[in-house]
Image: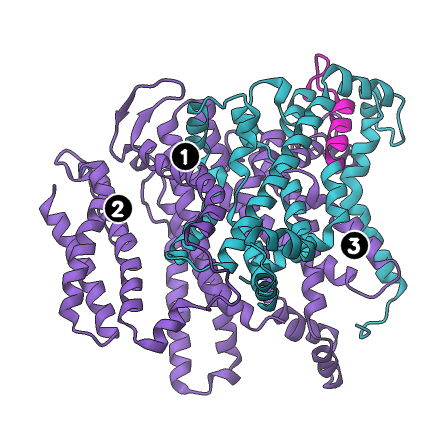
Amino acid sequence: MSLIPSRWYIHLLLWLACFIIGLPLIYAIIVATQTNAEVLSFNFSFGTALERNWDAVMNVRKLGNYMLNSTAQALIVTIGKTVLSLLAGLAFVYFRFPGKWLVFGFVLVTLMMPTEILIIALFRFVSSLGWGDNFLAITVPFLASATGAFLFRQHFANLPAELSEAAQLDGANPLQFLFRVLIPISWNTIGALAVIQFVYVWNMYLWPLLIIRDERIQVVQVGLGALRNVDASLTYGPLMLAAVVASVPPVIVFILLQRQFLSGFAITRDK
Amino acid sequence: MNVPIMAMAAAVGAAYMAWVFRQMQRPFWWGLGLGALTGTLGSLLFMTPLDFCTFEPERKPMDNALGVLLVLAGVAIVSYPTGWLARYFLARGEDRKALRGEQVKGAFNAPFFVPLLLLAPTLVILALFLYYPALDLFRLSTLLARLGTPRTAFRCVDNFSRLLDPNFTIVTLGLLIAALVILAVMWFLRRRGDVFRNDVYRTLSSVLPIVLLFLLLSATLDLFEANYRSVVFSTFYIAGWTVSLGLVIGLAVAYLAFQPVKGASIYRTLLIWPYAVSPAIAGIIFFVMFDPVGGIINHVLGQLGLGQPQWLKDPWLARWTIIIASVWKTLGYNILFYIAGLQNIANDLLEAAAIDGANAWQRFYHVVLPGLSPITFFLVITNITYAFFELFGTVDFLTRGGPAGSTSIMIYEIYTRGIIEFDIGRAAAQSIILFIMVIGVTIFQFRTSGRSVSYGA
């Protein structure tokens, strides 16, 4: 693209855009280091209370514990969903079986059922399983999705048929074919699903808010709510510090895998 | 049992199926028979669990109307797929192959249960945690049920009819008249011929979808009683501004970031990261920024002598605070996808336009914008989904639905009714209304995406 020569004002405008988008974060980082008195005096430089705020966040409110729970939840769901989606994609692309279109439709229709709509009924069902306050409640329901199955179905369908024909000539069974041939050439798609899922699960808020009451297994998004009031009144510093710390893992994963993220959506988009 | 209603359903089904059979050039009376059967079954789909309660003599006209709608919905749900199957089986040879879709190459020769075994975990989880709750939601919506108490009472469609109070406003009427006038003018111009060179016709044909969209939104709002209408209004208002501002600003920034400048990938990373920040944390950060005492926004406004708006106390300002937070949160996502979309627009197309003497704005308007339409469509859908569902976290931390319910969007209202107030029946009914909207958007998406992708790069 060389139609519009790059000029200094493009840099200026881009700097401005980055600055405006970054402003909430910059503000949050500054407030995270300040005491309430420093916040209220609107002194826009780093404050003196980072250590104290860190202590309030990590030791009084146990943010680290919430972060561990969220990490475990995000990893379990991401890995589990990737495995189940690989298996589903394999079944849809490399097998003929009666009623395939029916099974496909069964999976397709779930695109219209966001968990958020079903929470009332899901809450009753999961509670009736005795999973209230159980780690199973925030992992198992999210282990399968239409998005994941279709992502791999689309990816496998675009691979040359010679791959599986050659594998069958060599006497490989479907699982050997999956692990020895398909997975090694699918890391980009796996990365795509992984980053989408990791960010989605880490940022999940409504469902854990409903189903988990036990602080010991609560996830970080809900745990943040307890930081509104560390002392008697609103405490800005610890709240902002926790918000910044809790955003670090998904932002890093997203930035590192942004290319895969994009390609994952591009594949599901034109199915 | 309610014979007149079932007869009506059978007649509707029969008419539809007769039309399908005539299209397939088969005797239409076969269709009449099949359609009467699917129509009758369709009427029973919702009415068996409801036991035709909406047509009991003491019921109000609203309940009767809901009953008719439910019967018709049931007829459609049973008849439409049957019609599709009938088309498939009536088609001959080659046509049937086309309907069946691509054949599998390089398939494994395995007994039929092997693929089903591979699919089993996915299917079981979808059935247990999506299908079963979805069905249960319909059952719950007919009940007076409280969270934590096992006893329930059947309430027919009361949970729905208490949300409804159709009352068509002057706005809807005005939009309807505008749409009709536009259609009439377009029809008139078309009769005079040569419409593709006519600027008036082109303008009207691009305005018409917008008028129809607003007509649809306004008519939807008019269906509900005052309190719930304000909930639906807030949802549409916040979603509408989030989508339109997010896309326009996102495209503008993406157009900048797409220019080949030094450090483009660093700029890009600095622009898109807010996508990964959670909606709840966006709510927390903006809550502190807009705080009347310690927030930076009012401090800066005060320094500039612009007063001290009570962001979270005034209904409109509170909605706008939510909109600002949600635009900030979705902007990174929109920028990321628009940059990718811009990279897909063929360079030679732009160069050809430049050689033809198109200036920068003309190139943008006539080449770039149409080229981005598939990605814009995709972003509209994902942004709407974000504003309808994921915004919950932002609302909960920023305004808790207040002041006076002005930022209580539909998903937040479900949470308040069902979980805070324990009224599961009413929350389930509201969930189903939201469900219907999602189904509407999804069907629209499926029907149009085929077309919009076709001229994509």
> Mark 1 belongs to which amino acid?
Asn
The hue used for chain B is purple
Q: Main secondary structure of the magenta part?
A: helix
Image mark 1: chain: B
Residue at 50% in and 41% down:
B234
Looking at the image, do the residues carrying marks 3 and 2 touch, with CB atoms under 8 Å apart?
no
Image mark 2: chain: B
Provide the secondary structure element on which disc 1 rests.
helix
Quarter-of-image position of residue A102 = bottom left
Image quadrant where one finds the C terminus of chain B = bottom right
Quarter-of-image position of residue B22 = bottom left
> Can you tell which chain is drawn cyan?
A
The tag on residue B268 is 3
Mark pair 3, 2: CA separation:
50 Å
> Mark 2 belongs to which amino acid?
Leu
> Mark 3 belongs to which amino acid?
Arg
Other-residue count near label 3 (Cα within 10 Å), few / some / many at <14 / 14–19 / ≥20: many
Mark 2, residue position: B70
x, y percent for residue B210 = 49, 62
Instruction: State the residue lying farthest toward the left.
Output: B3
Mark 1, residue position: B227
